[in-house]
Amino acid sequence: MTEASPSKTTRAAARRIGPFSVSPIGLGCMNFSHAYGTPPPPEQAERVLLAALEAGVTLFDTAALYGFGGNEKLVGRVLAPHRDRIVLSSKGGMAGVPFDDGMKRVIDGRPEAVRRNCEDSLKRLGTEVIDLYYLHRWDKAVPIEESVGEMARLKAEGKIRALGLSEVSAATLRRAHAVHPIAAVQTEYSLWTRNAEIAVLAACRELGAAFVAFSPVARGYLTAAPPVVSELDAKDIRRGMPRFSEPAHWAANLKLREGFVALAREAGATPAQLALAWLLAQGEDIVPIPGTTRVDHLLEDLGAATLRLPAAVIERAGALVNHKSVSGPRYSAQASSEVDTETFEA
């Protein structure tokens, strides 16, 4: 494993998101409360958050959906004493809604829902303003102009500082940007998920929006210890993702991974570091936000920011793992219908 000084790692090359200067690698906080089975104990999550802060991470990303508000409470409680040192981002427009049979995830982009989500997030985060506030999903029943218009009003009221969108197409981004400048687009982007390269990344650059890449190590696939699919928690979202859940796809992807791991070893990096270094090399407007529940994995990820790899290694990584070589679609048909991103032709 390539070691790097944590303080040097994240202060080496700050990146811009709207009015903010942020560490080149941020922290996605979803893992503490959501998506990958039983969450870690709160004290473990707190250790990771504080270790990230100590290492110089300045961008922390959460959402109303994660843990149905629990993630925002955790992040807010731990980071409140350090509020002036960080750029705090959250998301609304998709949140937990109580029903007779329990809480359920609901996508709702109506102005009144966007406002309610934002105001609820402010309370949970214990802050007067959210630095970067995203529309988590475009509600296709509501014109994007209406949702973004309400976000612009929230900004005018001083409740948010900059606007973002998550999982949107280039066309939707342009419509939204015509209402109010969009500071960032957040979408999955990694060696094995390249949809952003079709159109939205170019649109971000045209409009001056940063690109925040979630799941940059492919939900654990591009790490030293990929998930054992048969042992995944029943609630782990990867159980519904064809690349993991369908045996033929997973077998092919494990075979593909062998060459990538060998390349990382040759380069003197871990697989996760090579994956993150590849992403950072795609442009200074890209900010990856890997998530983890372990301090050692956090520090390993941050080490990618100071790796100096030959261009040939970066090119080989991209040629080895890409949308043509990976087996299986990113999402199930149902999940795909909820996002508004361009997809590669079959």
Image: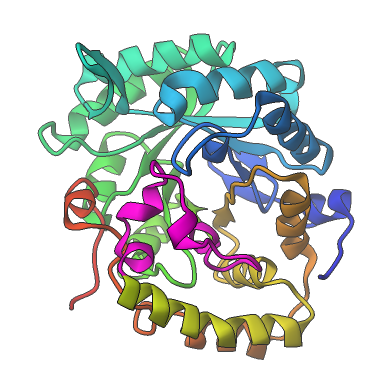
Rendered location of residue 10, percent (x, y): 77, 51
- Give the extent of the magenta segment: 217-246
In the orientation shown, which residue stands out farthest toward the front? Answer: 230
Q: Quadrant of the C terminus?
A: bottom left
Residue 284's image quarter?
A: bottom right
Most extreme residue toward the left is 141
Front residue of 211 and 106: 106
Quarter-of-image position of residue 315: bottom right
Q: Residue at 59% of width from left, 51% of height from top? A: 290
Q: Say left or right for 277 vs 286.
A: right
Q: Residue at x 67, y 53 (%)?
A: 24
Could you tell whether 99 is left or right of 177 in the image?
Answer: left
Give the x, y percent position of residue 70: 50, 20
Q: Residue at x 33, y 72 (%)?
A: 247
Assess whether residue 245 is covered by the magenta stretch.
yes
Q: Is residue 226 located in the magenta-colored stretch of the structure?
A: yes
Q: Is residue 156 above or below residue 249?
A: above
| Residue at the image position 74 percent from the left and 88 percent from the top | 266
Q: Nearer the viewer, residue 101 or 80?
A: 101
| Tally of numbered tags | 0
Task: Evaluate whether residue 13 shows in this view.
Answer: no
